[in-house]
Image: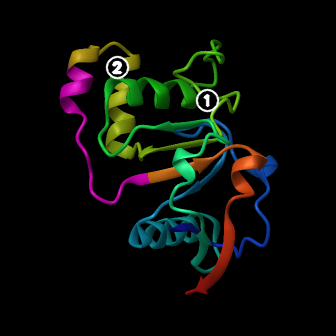
Amino acid sequence: MILYHGSNTDIKEINLNICKPFRDFGKGFYLTDIRTQAENMAKRTTRIKGGSPVLNLYEIDDAFMKTSALTVKDFFAVPTEEWALFVMNNRNRYFSDVKSQLCNQDCKYDVVHGPVADDAMAVLFQQYEQEFIDLEMLKKRMTYKELSMQYSFHTEKAVALLKKTRTIYG
């Protein structure tokens, strides 16, 4: 399987220490198997931080999600109540129950896979957290968006499975 990381940098070595916390699935290195999604992320990163778009390509064994050597959380392709709570808890700087299965701030999962919480989802989460909508309404308004899948790698053990194959500039 080929996974893509869109950036403004050729990533020579993955360094989990510089990954930002409070992301959808916790602090980690994020990739996608959808090339156009990674290309769009590279363009977005370039608009924000400058530089030029860079696509970093990694190869990983197709069966890595099923290995007993990793602790994997797979939300598959559809936003669910569990996925929404997981994302909200990971994004929340004040969430304190880090041992919860609905959180990965402690990197209990080596790899997490599922939909990206885009800007529309972020608005829904904010409405839920501010109690403008309830959990039922949140679930009704969540929709799957094409080009929205991500894999996040949270531990050195998981990152070690990624083999950099190519860098595409431009």
Q: Which residue is mark 1?
A: 104
Label tally: 2
What range is drawn magenta here? 137-149
**Other residues around mark 2 within 10 Å, as few (<14) / some (14–19) / many (≥20):** some
Query: Does the magenta-highlighted stretch encompass residue 139?
Result: yes
Write down the quadrant of residue 155 in the picture: top right
Q: Nearer the viewer, residue 51 or 113?
A: 113
Please say if 53 is above or below 141. below
Q: Identify residue type, mark 2.
A: Tyr
At a point 24% along the width and 25% down the height, the residue shown is 139
The residue closer to the viewer here, 101 or 17, is: 101
Vertical comparison of 41 with 85: above or below: below
Q: In terms of image quadrants, where is residue 167?
A: bottom right
Q: Is residue 167 visible?
A: yes
Q: Cβ–Cβ below 8 Å for labels 1 and 2?
A: no
| Of the image marks 1 and 2, the number of the one nearer the N terminus | 1
Q: Residue at x 57, y 53 (%)?
A: 64
Query: Taking 94 as reference, is 118 left or right?
Result: left
Residue occupied by mark 2? 128
> Which of label 1 and label 2 is nearer to you?
1
